[in-house]
Amino acid sequence: MPHPSIRFTVEATEAGVHSARRRVSSAVRGWMRHLDEDLHFNLELVTSELLTNGLRHTCGRMTAQVTLAHGLAVVEVFDGSRDLPRPRSTQNDDECGRGLMLIEDLCLLQGAETTDSGKRCWAILSVETAPARAAEVQPREEECNDSTTDDDRWSLSPIGKGLLSRLFPTP
């Protein structure tokens, strides 16, 4: 069974960003009738920030895509600029420049890459409710007794551990 997905093209304008954010929000509400309000807000904010970054750094059209799979929302924005986003230093009173930091704080993973026609910026959010996520990331008994874990070499949040266990299940 295919995963729910929406893909559409919008003009790189403020009105296009607003319209795209509403379209994504409406689609996800249709797919997930019981989506937690905080998770819904985060999804809208991340979508808006990715689109706004595209708006600021390209002209013409952008393509937005959102796919739900395995309790995750993958938000992608394609635009015609090959310049990859870079975090900026901001001051407390700056009105812009915090988009990438917001995306990083709200998402499990995020990134950008060049494509043949420009670039693709993406972010992955968990859209599961908090109790379901907490139950899923509890360590298994054999992990608790194993003293040779990679915890000394890697830093990974409980949500990130849950994501990796879903992406790469152990037999």
Image: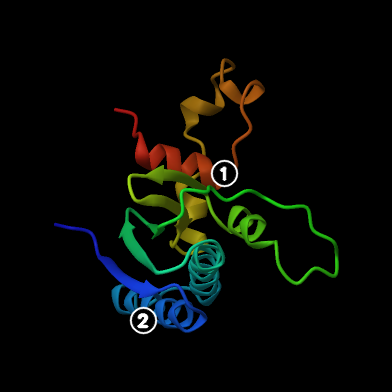
Q: Residue at x 63, y 32 (%)?
A: 155
Crowding at mark 1 (Cα within 10 Å: few <14, some 14-19, many 20+)? some
Q: Secondary structure at mark 2?
A: helix
Which image quarter holds the N terminus?
Answer: bottom left
Expressed as whole percent of the image width and height from the top left, the position of residue 51 reads 49, 67
In this view, which residue lies farthest toward the top?
Answer: 148
Q: CA distance from mark 2 to mark 1?
A: 29 Å
Q: Nearer the viewer, residue 156 or 16?
A: 16
Expressed as whole percent of the image width and height from the top left, the position of residue 119 reads 42, 50
Expressed as whole percent of the image width and height from the top left, the position of residue 32 reads 34, 73
Coloring applied to the structure: rainbow
In this view, which residue lies farthest toward the left?
Answer: 1
Q: Residue at x 55, y 28 (%)?
A: 144
Q: Is residue 19 above or below residue 129?
A: below
Q: Is residue 163 left or right of residue 159?
A: left
Q: Is residue 168 left or right of residue 149?
A: left
Q: Nearer the viewer, residue 13 or 91?
A: 13
Residue receiving disc 1: 158
Q: How many marks?
A: 2
Q: Residue at x 50, y 46 (%)?
A: 111
Q: Amino acid at mark 2?
A: Ser
Which image quarter holds the C terminus?
Answer: top left
Q: Is residue 170 above or below residue 167?
A: above
Q: Residue at x 35, y 65 (%)?
A: 63
Camera-near label (2 vs 1) is 2
Residue receiving disc 2: 26
